[in-house]
Amino acid sequence: MLAELPETEADGAIAAIYSEIRQLWAVPYVSSLQRHLASKPGWLEWSWAALAPAFRSGAAQTAGWRAATAVDVGALPSLSPGDLAGLGVDLAGAGRIEEICAGFVRVAPVNLMFAGLLRRLLDGERPGGSGWPNSTWTPPEMLPALPAMVDMTALTVEARDALLRLGTDVGGVPFVPGLYRMLAHWPAYAAHLADQLPPLFGAPETAAARSVLLDGIDGAVKVLFETLPAIPAQPPAPSVADHDAVRAALDTYRRTSPEMVVFGRLVAEALPPTEAWSHEGSR
């Protein structure tokens, strides 16, 4: 897996950035993108100093969420309460799965905005806009706390193999998106998804949805970058020796973040409505 600095181990400036990201993304965790940058000396601090104005204003989040609403994700076969029970998921578990999906559908477009803006900095571009001096944006209500991502080394061989089928790799290193690492708390359900989702990863309809989302993100990134103010002198820029590694990570998120929107919605929309559980119990 990509190196990360866990939230529980963050302190000082990084802990403060993590806290602000949780507030501005309106989710109770920090994504692996920022945790990965934090594992490289100076990268999260510099990136956040440069890009934070776009997120404190809400302009980046609003643009990302707007781009995501234009995506047609199709549908998976619907699951009944009985189907889920056979996969080890009860009513409470179904609610938790829905919350997990909602978190990633909310976060992924914002991370795409973050990655797109950061990529322009890596390309040598430097902003010099006026910023958003009169912004009064308020983040949406925070989503509920989500379960921790499973430790892949603690899984059974079968469960780990199922998760790896839902992942990708970065330079030969396995990378499993956080959505699936949380859903792995229900191993049989995760194995079901490992059968259902991989055939869609390369499907034309998935490619079309990804393209629509990325086109919207790229257009918004261009506009926002022109508005960003100049990068502060402190903290200093991190080592250029890490540029290729950071670029590779951004490439990974550009592939996987659209999938979090597409497959997060697919998974959530395949769940039975709450009232279906009452009907199932009355039979």
Image (tube, rainbow, N blue to C red):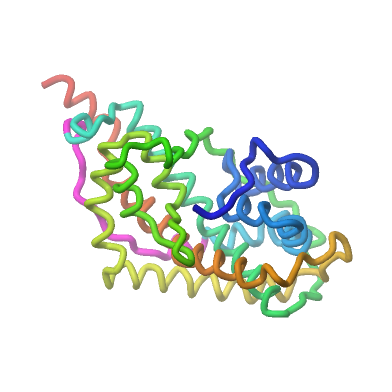
Q: Residue furthest right?
A: 233
Location of residue 94 with respect to 46 vertically, above or below: above
Residue found at the very far top of the displayed protein? 282
The location of residue 225, given as percent across then percent down, is: 69, 73
User: Magenta region: which residues?
Assistant: 66-82
- 220 w.r.t. 165: above or below: below
Q: Main secondary structure of the magenta part?
A: loop
Percent across and percent down for residue 265 are 36, 51
Task: In the rendered view, tell whether residue 42 sits above or below residue 230.
Answer: above
Q: Quadrant of residue 91?
A: top left
Asked whether, in this view, residue 279 is left or right of residue 266, the answer is left
Residue located at (83% from left, 71% from top) = 230
Q: Is residue 76 magenta?
A: yes
Q: Nearer the viewer, residue 265 or 44?
A: 44
Answer with the quarter of the image where residue 256 lies: bottom left
In-image side of 16 versus 169 (left or right): right
At x 37% / y 68%, what residue is drawn?
Answer: 209
Residue 178 position, x and y percent, is 46, 48
Q: How many badges with numbers are in the image? A: 0
Q: Quadrant of residue 120?
A: bottom right
Residue 11, position as x, y percentages in the image: 75, 39
Extreme residue in the left direction: 283
The residue at the point 64 percent across, 43 percent down is: 22
Q: Quadrant of the C terminus?
A: top left
Residue closest to the eye, 6 or 114: 6
127 displayed left or right of 214: right
